[in-house]
């Protein structure tokens, strides 16, 4: 049986939020603790973050520790998962450079996630080459660790497609050196792409519409009470709409039956609550207060664990250093396999030297 390996990660462009949590982090922790995977690699993608933050390296530098603290806070365990920093693994750049020959410009231009990110960043004609090609570098990250499983949110689907194409092309030209990865999306539909508190399609650090994992209770409550709902649901007795109503999407993502028993015993299920809202007679404030109780309960232990780690920052850097050293060893082995498959391993190939000698012996 071949090994089961996870690789996934986040850009250090800000603290992690509840979209990351339901889209990827929660699953990682579950998979880590289930113990079915042979290896788990969690990458802080600073080199990728620099592709659209080249003029702001300090932002990336400051956020490495924020992401690391969020990881530890949600329960990633450095004894079970290798947590590392992308830029500390130079092998990833080398792999990217060779993969670039296997991808066309037209193929990169078709990537819908990159397209919408270019729009959101107002890059227009001034797209940095590094940003444009980040799906290739992501393929390098995934394949360097021979990852079989990549647990991510829905926006990463095009990246996984690109990675698979590169693997197939590489293996067909040079021989089977790389492993094809599989995406692992959240099972709960509301978690595929959690919307922002402003109703925007995606909660995103870059859009400033997030509830952060480290947020204090008052701030969580303030944000929830200000959340986007149904703009036409003005009076309590008005019928309301569920679709596109962020509060209900969050209830889909975070709600459980036991929450009703404890926090809102007048209802027995989310279906019943939704029906009442649609009929009219249920105010936004009541639903928001319910969501607030759920979120407070979910985020409290995360925030408390983070505070413990915050007391020992040098220990957290030590985890990252050790993780990066371990990760580099793995990536170096893959790079050696790749170079030998590509026939650029001149000094390791004695038959090459002997063969060249023979050419001149006749
Ligand atoms: P940036 O705006 O800097 O790109 P981001 O908030 O999009 O930041 P990333 O670091 O790009 O975060 O994404 C990290 C992981 O979290 C990916 O697996 C991504 O799919 C997932 N993710 C990000 N935002 C959401 C969301 N709103 N819902 C579900 N998953 C998400
Ligand atoms: Mg992103």
Image (cartoon, grey):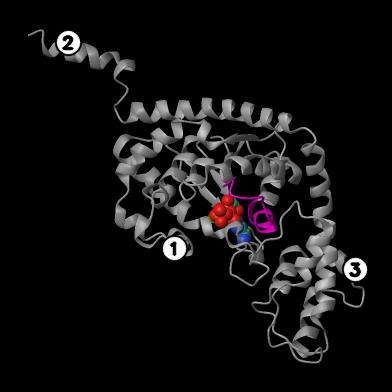
Query: Residue 172 vs residue 323: left or right?
Result: left
Confirm or deny contact between disc 3 and disc 1 (CB under 8 A).
no
Write down the region rendered in magenta.
9-24
Asked whether mark 1 and ligand 1 are closer than 8 Å, the reply comes as no
284 to 38, vertically: above or below: below
Q: Is 12 a magenta residue? A: yes
* Residue that mark 3 sits on: 263
Residue 256: percent from left, percent from top: 81, 65
Q: Residue at x 63, y 44 (%)?
A: 63
* Residue that mark 1 sits on: 122
The mark total stands at: 3
User: The N terminus appears in which quarter of the rendering?
Assistant: top right
Residue 130: percent from left, percent from top: 40, 47
Asked whether mark 2 and ligand 1 are closer than 8 Å, the reply comes as no
Q: Tell me, yes or no, if residue 185 can be seen here.
A: no
Q: Tell me, yes or no, if residue 305 can be seen here.
A: yes
Query: Residue 116 vs residue 296: left or right?
Result: left
């Amino acid at each position: 049986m071949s090994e089961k390996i996870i690789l996934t990660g986040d850009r250090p462009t800000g603290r992690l939020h509840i979209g990351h949590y339901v889209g990827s982090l929660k699953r990682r922790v579950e998979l880590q603790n289930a113990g079915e995977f042979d290896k788990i690699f969690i990458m802080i993608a600073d080199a990728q973050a620099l592709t659209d933050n080249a003029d702001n390296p300090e932002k990336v530098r400051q956020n490495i520790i924020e992401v690391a603290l969020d990881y530890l806070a949600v329960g990633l365990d450095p004894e079970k998962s290798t947590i590392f920093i992308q830029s500390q693994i130079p092998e990833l750049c080398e792999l990217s450079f060779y993969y670039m020959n296997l991808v066309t410009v037209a193929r990169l231009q078709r990537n819908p996630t990159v397209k919408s990110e270019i729009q959101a960043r107002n890059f227009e004609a001034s797209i940095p080459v590094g940003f444009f090609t980040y799906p290739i570098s992501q393929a390098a990250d995934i394949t360097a660790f021979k990852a079989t499983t990549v647990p991510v949110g829905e926006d990463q689907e095009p990246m996984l497609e690109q990675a698979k194409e590169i693997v197939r092309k590489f293996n067909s030209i040079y021989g089977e050196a790389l492993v094809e990865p599989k995406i692992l999306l959240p099972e709960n539909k509301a978690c595929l792409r959690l919307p922002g508190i402003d109703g925007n399609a995606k909660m995103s650090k870059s859009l400033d519409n997030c509830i952060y994992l480290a947020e204090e209770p008052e701030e969580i409550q303030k944000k929830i009470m200000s959340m986007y709902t149904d703009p036409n649901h003005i009076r309590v007795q008005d019928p309301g709409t569920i679709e596109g109503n962020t509060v209900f999407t969050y209830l889909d993502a975070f709600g459980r039956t036991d929450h009703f028993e404890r926090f809102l015993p007048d209802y027995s299920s989310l279906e019943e609550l939704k029906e009442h809202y649609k009929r009219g007679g249920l105010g936004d404030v009541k639903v928001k207060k319910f969501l607030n109780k759920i979120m407070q309960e979910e985020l409290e232990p995360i925030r408390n664990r983070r505070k413990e780690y915050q007391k020992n920052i040098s220990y957290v850097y030590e985890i990252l250093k050790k993780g990066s050293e371990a990760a580099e060893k793995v990536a170096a082995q893959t790079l050696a396999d790749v170079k030998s498959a590509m026939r650029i391993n001149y000094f390791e190939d004695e038959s090459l030297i002997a063969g060249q000698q023979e050419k001149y012996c006749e």
